[in-house]
Image (cartoon, helix red, strand yellow):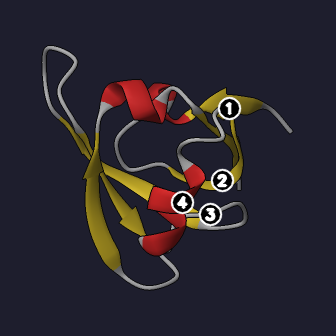
Amino acid sequence: MQQSSLDKIKIGEQVSVTDFKSLELPAKFYELGFFPGSIVEVKYKAPFNGPICLKIIDNDTLIAIRKSEAKLIITKAI
């Protein structure tokens, strides 16, 4: 299975979160229901390195995260 950072996933693709590259991110993302094993779908990417809108499939939540944060989230195709 090929792994990639979340910022490289295309709009409409669903992936499983496998890991975080930073220890500072998890507390914030766990509160949102975004943790290793979560299935997420990329809904929208703003231009010019803007935020990325994600749908967390498990709890049907939409969140927007910075591209710099998305680079720290490792995913795998499902």
Q: Is residue 40 visible?
A: no
On screen, 63 above or below 70? below
> Of marks 1 and 4, which one's residue comes earlier in the chain?
1
How far apart are the alpha carbons under marks 1 and 4?
A: 13 Å
How far apart are the alpha carbons under marks 1 and 2?
A: 12 Å
How far apart are the alpha carbons under marks 4 and 3?
A: 9 Å
How far apart are the alpha carbons under marks 3 and 1?
A: 12 Å
Question: Which mark is drawn over residue 35?
Answer: 3
Q: Secondary structure at mark 4?
A: helix
At label 2, the amino acid type is Val
Judging by the rendered image, the residue that carries numbered circle 1 is 21
Q: Nearer the viewer, mark 2 or mark 3?
A: 3
> Of marks 3 and 1, which one's residue comes earlier in the chain?
1
Do callouts 3 and 1 mark residues in contact (Cβ within 8 Å)? no
Q: x, y (%) of residue 61?
A: 32, 76
Judging by the rendered image, the residue that carries numbered circle 4 is 27
Judging by the rendered image, the residue that carries numbered circle 2 is 17
Do callouts 2 and 3 mark residues in contact (Cβ within 8 Å)? yes
Q: x, y (%) of residue 13?
A: 47, 48
How far apart are the alpha carbons under marks 2 and 4?
A: 15 Å
